[in-house]
Image (cartoon, helix red, strand yellow):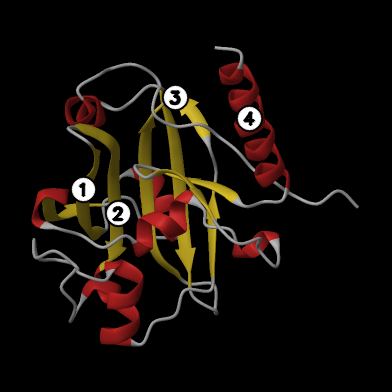
């Protein structure tokens, strides 16, 4: 019995060491993973980039439609409100529970000639699909993390109206053009915020 606290203490200390070295990373819907130490903070996976790179399966897709851009999406894209955009709504599952509700909006000129406006799953994710089909390159992602109430749609998908961690994000090409806007809702009881960074 006396060995158990010692073993637990060793595990906790090892985990703290790995976290301080930047080798523990949490991705929504996937839990914690141990990785090699990143060369720089920019190389760490963030929720927005992870969402854009996530491969899809048929069970992930909730709806794909041409819709008027919501006000906040239009503002981030720099277009008039209600400008037509492609909305791609998905869920990520952890065991038998929805662990993230995701909505991705694409300008029509970005979606044209791709599979983004069809319900067909993207086997290699949005980023690789756009790069392969239209030679569009992701340059940077702007994202924020907020605690908020889920929208009515998100609450239905998540099966709960409890507060969520919300991640609104924009993906830009090298010229600064917005390639997509996304909103990710993460149940707070399934996700934690963690970062490791150097102190200089």
Q: Which residue is mark 3?
A: 148
Left or right: residue 36 compared with residue 99: right
Label 1: few (<14), some (14–19) or many (≥20) C-alpha neighbours in 10 Å: many
Q: Which residue is mark 1?
A: 90
Q: Position of residue 154 (x, y in %)?
A: 25, 31
Q: Nearer the viewer, mark 3 or mark 1?
A: 1
Residue 104 tag number: 2
Q: Which residue is mark 4?
A: 12
Q: Position of residue 191 (x, y in %)?
A: 44, 32
Q: Residue at x 8, y 61 (%)?
A: 119
Look at the image and tell me whether residue 61 can be seen: no
Label 2: few (<14), some (14–19) or many (≥20) C-alpha neighbours in 10 Å: many
Q: Residue at x 54, y 79 (%)?
A: 175
> Gap between marks 4 and 3, in whole Å?
31 Å
Q: Are marks 1 and 2 in contact (CB under 8 Å)?
A: yes
Label 4: few (<14), some (14–19) or many (≥20) C-alpha neighbours in 10 Å: few
């Amino acid at each position: 019995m006396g060995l158990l606290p010692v073993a637990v203490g060793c595990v906790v200390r090892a985990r703290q060491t790995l976290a301080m070295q930047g080798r523990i990373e949490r991705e929504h819907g996937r839990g914690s993973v141990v990785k090699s130490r990143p060369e720089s903070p920019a190389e760490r996976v963030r929720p927005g980039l992870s969402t854009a790179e996530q491969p899809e399966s048929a069970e992930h897709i909730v709806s794909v439609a041409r819709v008027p851009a919501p006000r906040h999406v239009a503002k981030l894209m720099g277009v008039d409100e209600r400008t037509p955009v492609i909305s791609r709504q998905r869920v990520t599952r952890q065991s038998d529970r929805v662990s993230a509700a995701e909505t991705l909006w694409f300008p029509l000129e970005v979606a044209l000639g791709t599979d983004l406006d069809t319900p067909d799953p993207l086997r290699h994710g949005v980023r690789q699909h756009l790069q392969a089909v239209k030679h569009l390159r992701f340059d940077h992602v702007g994202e924020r993390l907020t605690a908020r109430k889920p929208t009515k749609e998100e609450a239905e998908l998540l099966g709960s109206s409890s507060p969520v961690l919300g991640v609104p994000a924009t993906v830009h090409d090298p010229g600064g053009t917005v390639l997509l806007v996304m909103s990710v809702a993460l149940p707070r009881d399934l996700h934690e915020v963690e970062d490791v960074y150097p102190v200089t």
